[in-house]
Image: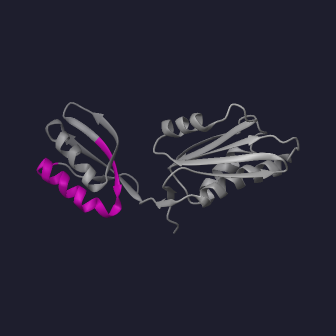
Amino acid sequence: MHMTSTLATPCEYQETIRKSRFLAKAAPVSSPEEAQAFIQEVSDASATHNCWAWKLGSQYRFSDDGEPGGTAGRPMLTAIEGQDCDQVVVVVIRWFGGIQLGTGGLARAYGGSAAKCLQAGERVELVARVRCSCHCRFAELALLKSRLSDYDALIESEIFDSEGAELQLAFPAAQQPQVQKLLSDISRGRSKLHLLDP
């Protein structure tokens, strides 16, 4: 069982392959918006291509930015997965040096630059989280929310109804008994956690 990790801080890696310069920049992100903002921030308009890939749990996106389909973004995503990384974005900026690399050469260059960049970075292990739902009355909501951070619990979604809200929570598996107790205490035993995915 591999432990998935993210980057502790942004990092970069550069190499020249057959006269083309490849500069890889990677960073930890916690949302698609953050990933897109990083891509816009580091992309270089003077470069030939700014290719990128990001992965956040089951969500991912990538772009070949004008390189032949499948030669840049996809190998970069594969590199992220191959390095057991999650919650990261990688941008590989290429300045063309006049020599064609061919599709295999491009895939190796983009995938390799991304992998070496992630290998060089300082990593933090990501704790496996469980996802649960629970129902909370309006009167209990503020108190519950204020206490959730004590258990490193994230609110993934919140759907209001006439009584209160259905919350979807994600938190470290080890915290489940404490979160259940918190919920029971606040709701006087009325609310229970329901595990969403086994």
Give the image location of residue 147, x and y in percent: 21, 49
Residue at 54 percent of width and 50 percent of height: 10
20 shown above or below 171: above
- Residue 21: image x %, image y %? 76, 46
Q: Does residue 39 appear to the left or right of 165 in the view shown? A: right
Was residue 2 drawn as part of the magenta stretch in this picture? Answer: no
> 150 or 60: nearer the eye?
150
Residue drawn at x 85%, y 47% as measured from the top left: 101
Q: In this image, 107 relative to 165: left or right?
A: right
Total numbered badges shown on the rendered structure: 0
Q: Nearer the viewer, residue 129 or 118?
A: 118
- Residue 167: x and y in percent read 29, 42
Q: Is residue 82 left or right of residue 98?
A: left
Where the C terminus falls, by quadrant? bottom left
- Looking at the rendering, the stretch of residues picked out in magenta corresponds to 167-190
Which of 140 and 40 lies nearest the eye of the viewer? Answer: 40
Identify the main secondary structure in magenta.
helix
